[in-house]
């Protein structure tokens, strides 16, 4: 029998427009510098019944060559490090600064796992800023045939203690089993060892969900609903129900069970706020300010001229990437988030998005902004 484990002692008037409108992971070759877009476009409260491709990478536990003292590298796990790629240094920095938590380092880790019908699910890593939470869970005792897409029938995530309270709502931007695929430095999908993708006879991509230990990882990206809210220090419930496989959008259960968790998220803010005050070239928007953290950003605009809009195309500029001080361009950094006008007058707007990798906020020199659905981009420098 499963049980719940305690892991730690003004709404906008327009409908939320979820970014990255495609659900497919490989619609990325649109121009020379196009990137790999992998997030699902799940919209709304807190529940989902869908799977999409996720990405992961490899981190190394190393010993210092300078001294005899072991250096803890705070391994984020196979799935998390691909979903939110980070160097060893960044993994260590975010973990030691309290922005990330690696559960395997907790002496109580074995007691955090939940087992039902022979399947064990345990928390792996959580990374949080004011706006987003990235969570990974390890699944042991379940395997799938080659070519099958594993997943849960239902994943329910909410904050607080009452799932029916409107204040419990959390936006879900991604929930998926890690499939062994990551973006390379140019944003193109490859396997985690850097090798090119392989395909089945039907044209589908061959995925590798199971690691060398026979385990899988499930990755969640969730975010705030109210722009004035924050996830820092919040109590989050994550409930999984029924494990099986997806085929052509249909779920077939293999194990009927439930695995429920209660977790207190890290409470350390990593965001920095910048006043910009620059008009976005080719638009009627002025970028007023931006809040940047190592794992997400939030941009606020003043609207000089309201563009022609439709339900799916609000006409608001989207920050897609950044330019670093050394000239390095990361053109497709952001994925999963929200965009919209803050009220019915459409005099102000916002864009909030998570990343696919960890960045150094101090090294950001400019933002790469998508100004139209014709893929026009401009750079907006930000002052430090």
Image (cartoon, helix red, strand yellow):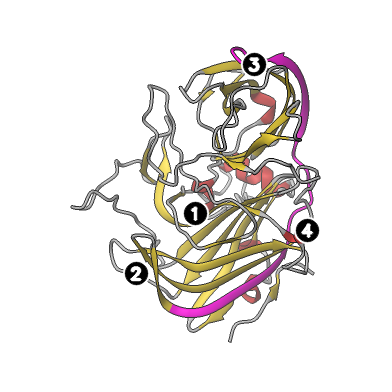
Left or right relative to 228: residue 320? left
Residue at screen point 51% across, 26% down: 331
Residue at screen point 45% across, 42% down: 22
Counting from the top left corner in percent of width and height, residue 294 is at: 66, 37
Q: Residue furthest left?
A: 201
Contact, CB < 8 Å: mark 2 with mark 3?
no
- Which circle's residue, 3 or 4, is located before the other in the chain? 4
Q: Nearer the viewer, mark 2 or mark 3?
A: 3
Region in magenta: 255-283
Q: CA distance from mark 1 to mark 2?
A: 17 Å
Q: Nearer the viewer, mark 4 or mark 2?
A: 4
> Circle 2 is placed at which residue position?
144
Q: Nearer the viewer, mark 1 or mark 2?
A: 2
Q: Residue furthest bottom?
A: 1
Main SS, magenta residues: strand
SS state under label 2: loop
> Circle 3 is placed at which residue position?
280
């Amino acid at each position: 029998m499963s049980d719940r484990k305690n892991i730690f002692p003004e709404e906008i008037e327009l409908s939320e427009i979820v970014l990255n409108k495609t659900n497919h992971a490989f619609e990325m070759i649109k121009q020379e510098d196009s990137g790999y877009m992998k997030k699902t476009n799940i919209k709304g409260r807190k529940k989902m019944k869908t799977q999409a491709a996720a990405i992961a990478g490899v981190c190394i536990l190393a010993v210092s060559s300078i001294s005899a003292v072991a250096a803890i590298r705070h391994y984020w796990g196979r799935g998390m490090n691909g979903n939110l790629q980070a160097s060893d240094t960044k993994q260590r920095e975010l973990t030691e600064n309290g922005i990330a938590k690696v559960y395997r380092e907790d002496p109580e880790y074995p007691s955090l796992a939940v087992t039902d019908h022979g399947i064990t699910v345990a928390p792996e890593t959580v990374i949080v800023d004011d706006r987003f939470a990235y969570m990974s869970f390890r699944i042991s005792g379940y395997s799938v045939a080659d070519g099958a897409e594993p997943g849960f029938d239902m994943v329910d995530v909410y904050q607080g203690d009452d799932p029916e309270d409107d204040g419990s709502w959390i936006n879900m931007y991604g929930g998926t089993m890690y499939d062994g695929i990551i973006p390379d430095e140019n944003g193109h999908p490859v396997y985690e060892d850097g090798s090119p993708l392989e395909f089945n006879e039907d044209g589908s991509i061959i995925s590798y969900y199971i690691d060398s230990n026979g385990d899988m990882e499930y990755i969640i990206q969730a975010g705030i609903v109210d722009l004035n809210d924050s996830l820092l220090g919040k109590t989050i419930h994550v409930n999984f129900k029924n494990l099986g496989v997806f085929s052509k959008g249909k779920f077939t259960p293999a194990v009927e069970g439930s695995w429920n968790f209660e977790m207190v998220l890290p409470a350390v803010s990593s965001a920095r706020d910048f006043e910009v005050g620059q008009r976005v070239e080719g638009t009627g928007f002025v970028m007023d300010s931006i809040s940047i953290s190592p794992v997400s950003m939030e941009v606020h605009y003043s609207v000089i001229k309201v563009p022609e809009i439709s339900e799916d195309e609000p006409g608001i500029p989207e920050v897609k990437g950044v330019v670093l001080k050394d000239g390095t361009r990361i053109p497709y950094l952001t994925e999963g988030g929200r965009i919209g006008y803050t009220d019915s007058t459409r005099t102000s707007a916002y864009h909030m998005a998570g990343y696919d990798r960890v960045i150094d906020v101090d090294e950001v020199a400019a933002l790469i902004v998508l100004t139209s659905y014709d893929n026009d981009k401009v750079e907006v420098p930000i002052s430090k």
